Image: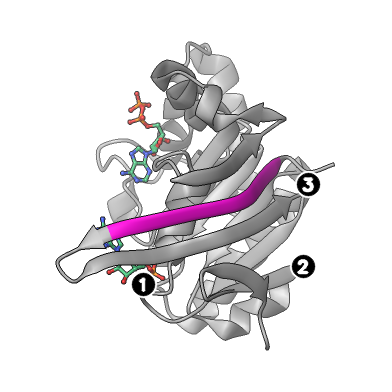
Amino acid sequence: KPIMRLVDVCRTYSTGEGALEVLKGANLELRPGEMVGLVGPSGSGKSTLLHTAGLLESPDSGLVEIDDVDAARMSERERTLTRRKKLGFVYQFHHLLPELNAIDNVAAPLMIDGVNRKIARERASKLLQAMGLSERERHQPGQLSGGEQQRVAIARSLANQPRVLIADEPTGNLDPMTTTAVFQSLFDTARTEQVAVLVATHNLELTTYMDRVLTLKDGQLTDADI
Ligand code: ADP
Ligand code: ADP
């Protein structure tokens, strides 16, 4: 049963040159533990799709549903809570807090949600272990390599036990070896935690890790030809 559904999602931007139809009936179903790649040239609408799935932008028409709840029927507050509790986000450039060590960076979202420090740290420690960073728990971001920092950011994005992880070029600034290691950890952890992962990437080699790879063609999602 899908955890997230996009049905006939349309999105048009008005520009100086007139209307730009970016999404023209995009359909997507994400199932728990599934890793789905999104590839395609710059400007094809990947970010628009991720922002729509991430409840950061509303479609002009069509349905966005998470856990059977229609996002259009959520209040602004419910939308924020859904983002916080059911969705996780990973970006090309992580935003770790430089003065906190790895474990406290990962525990932070839990403590913000009122989880007590001990339990938050236990969960953080488990996630860092899953990401292969047990030896780095007490290191601050500045003491970690780029790949390690990105793995801390991924662990943090999973802290609240999201149902869907939305990742926009999560390894865009990493070297190929590090990229592979980060993806392997992300993949294993997502499977174990039964998180659906939607990841936009330019790196076609990463598609070997995906269950499915999609691309936007004429504003619609289709199986990528790779
Ligand atoms: P991608 O992530 O694949 O590069 P985007 O979703 O960022 O694609 O953009 C798709 C198209 O929509 C591009 O032509 C972009 O210039 C345009 N676009 C994106 N956001 C806006 C906006 N807020 N206003 C007008 N045009 C936009
Ligand atoms: P709060 O800051 O109160 O937790 P927000 O609505 O600012 O609530 O953020 C909720 C979630 O949405 C956070 O996980 C955040 O990372 C993500 N988020 C907020 N704004 C953006 C944005 N512009 N692009 C991508 N993700 C965002």
**Residue tagged 2:** 211
Q: Is residue 213 above or below residue 2?
A: below
Q: Is mark 3 within 8 Å of ligand 2?
A: no
Give the alpha-carbon distance from disc 1 to disc 3, as whole Å: 26 Å
Q: Quadrant of residue 181?
A: bottom right
- Mark nearer the N terminus (1 vs 2): 1
Indicate which disc, 2 or 3, sits on the residue closer to the N terminus: 3
Q: Is residue 220 left or right of residue 190?
A: left
Q: Amino acid at mark 1?
A: Asn
> Does the stretch in magenta take in 10?
yes
Residue beneath the point at 66% across and 80% down: 224
Q: Residue furthest right?
A: 1
Q: Residue flagged by tag 3: what amino acid is it?
A: Thr
Which residue is identified by label 3? 192
Q: Which one is nearer the viewer's eye here, 189 or 129? A: 189
Q: CA distance from mark 1 to mark 2?
A: 23 Å
Classify mark 3: residues with Cα within 10 Å, few (<14), some (14-19) or many (20+).
Answer: few
Label 2 to label 3: alpha-carbon separation: 15 Å
- Residue 130 in view (yes/no): no
Q: Position of residue 121 (x, y in %)?
A: 54, 26
The disc labelled 2 sits on which kind of residue?
A: Asp
Point out the quarter of the image occupied by ligand 2. top left
Name the residue tied to disc 1.
173
Q: Nearer the viewer, residue 25 or 213?
A: 25
Which residue is drawn at the image coordinates 72% and 52% (left, top)?
A: 29
Query: Label 2: how many residues lie within 10 Å, few (<14), some (14-19) or many (20+)?
Result: few
Q: Which residues are magenta?
A: 4-13
Residue 134 appears at what percent x and percent y?
A: 58, 47
In the image, residue 136 lies in the stretch drawn in magenta: no
